[in-house]
Image (cartoon, rainbow, N blue to C red):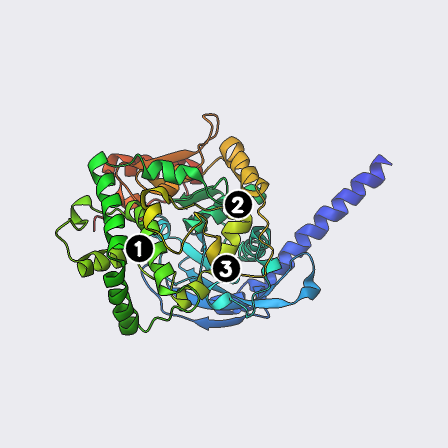
Amino acid sequence: MHAIKKILILFLVSLAINSCKESGVKLEGLAFEEQLKVLFPSAEISPIKVEDHFKKAYQLIIKQPLNHNNLEAGTFNHYVYVSHTDYSKPTVLVTEGYNAKHKTYELSKVLQSNQVMVEYRFYGKSRPEPIPWQYLKNDQAIEDYHSIVSKLKQLYTNKWISTGISKGGETVLIYKSKYPNDVDVAVPYVTPLINTQEDIRTENLINSVGTDECRNKIVAFQRAILKQRDTVLKALKAYAEKEAMQFTKVPMEEALEYAVLEFPFSFWQWGGNCEDIPTEAATANERFQYLIKISGMGLYNDKGFHHYLPSFYQHMVELGYYGFDLEPVKDLLKVVKSSSNMRFAPDDVDLTYNPEYIKNVRDFVENKGDHILYIYGANDPWGACAPTPKPSVDALKMVLEGGHHGTRIKDFSENDKQKIYDKLSAWLGDDVEIYPLKED
């Protein structure tokens, strides 16, 4: 029996080796574009503009399964951007949280790497109409990434690093928890792991960050806008006409109230300056212009409402989100009565929230999430929902004092940047070179 078992094992090993050799033969000697065609035979592949250190770049439109557990459910067009520099270099996988806009990510510059940017399913150009909501789940998206990475590893055999910003960073951590060996290092930026549909931790940060004077000034601004409602609404109507915005999904008065409620979150999220908040002497139009600068109307007009529907579906079902603090302006609100962002999720869809999904991801990254580099800004409300890896975990969490949602490695001090580079080197090994970011 032992002899038979040994022969069977040798046969299986030989079969695996020959299979690998055959795969290698198919790709060996082919031009890069031809290699992509072999790996993704049903994809539309076209060259795109080459930037920075890359030598070649391609857009791939992949026929991705709607349901990886049932291939008969059909496919959707999934947009992927592959930027190539050298087979021997590491490869950075960018997990976009929304639509993908082809560009060079910070980490790709630090490593002078190849880059694979994947648009999140059902966002941007990868959005089918109508959206089959039952397949817009994180586990399905993770299978998208796993499939793409598994194929491209036949080309890129050096280290793999995943990275993403905000919701894209959430995907980095979810992917790491589901397939911990797919990538060697994970670098999520400004990434929350949110507890509930209205995580109170964001509100707690907003009510404690900065000075009392600044926070009081924010509340005074919110109240002033609503007290001048009629005049501000006229300014909004003129603005909407100028920008060709329609407000049929969220009427203007409701949009104004949501923008006012959103103001404190966006102010701290994007590093608002307290000195810039209009004073009591400001006109209604000046206050409106500042509201547009901080909160904007990007979500509330019809185009934005439609654009962000997939995001709010995911937040309400699996990812969680934040709620609005109504108390400072409750007596001045006429339309908005709920602190929830459920208003911006799709109608007639099951929005049952799964509280265990992110809890399980957090449990993994905090207790087993080795080789994860976390980047945060201390004043960013989303940072209040950041995971905290246990001391026994080989991870590094860097928080920039005074930083916001736009915090990147380049913003840290030279000493802190070196700490980051040293950790990346330790994880990636001596054969991966680090290229320190140059000052802007």
CA separation, marks 1 and 3? 20 Å
Residue occupied by mark 3? 310
Decide if residue 248 is on the left or right side of residue 435: right
Asked if residue 40 is positioned above or below residue 323 in the image, the reply reads: below
> Is 282 left or right of 51, judged from the image as shown?
left
- Identify which amino acid the numbered label 2 is placed on: Ile
The CA span between labels 3 and 2 is 18 Å
Q: Is residue 327 above or below residue 121?
A: above
Secondary structure found at label 3: helix
Question: Quick one: label 2, few (<14), some, or many (20+) residues within 10 Å?
Answer: many
Which amino acid lies under the numbered mark 1 shown in the image of this protein?
Ser
Q: Residue at x 59, y 49 (%)?
A: 352
**Quarter of the rendering occupied by the N terminus:** top right
Q: Nearer the viewer, residue 109 or 207?
A: 207
Residue underneath mark 1: 295
Residue 154 visible from this viewpoint: yes
Q: Nearer the viewer, mark 1 or mark 2?
A: 1
The residue indicated by pointer 2 is: 174
Residue at 48%, 25% in the rendered image: 392
Which of the two labelled residues, at mark 1 and mark 3, occupies the earlier sequence position?
1
For numbered disc 1, what is the local secondary structure?
loop
Mark 1–mark 2 distance (CA, rounded to whole Å): 29 Å
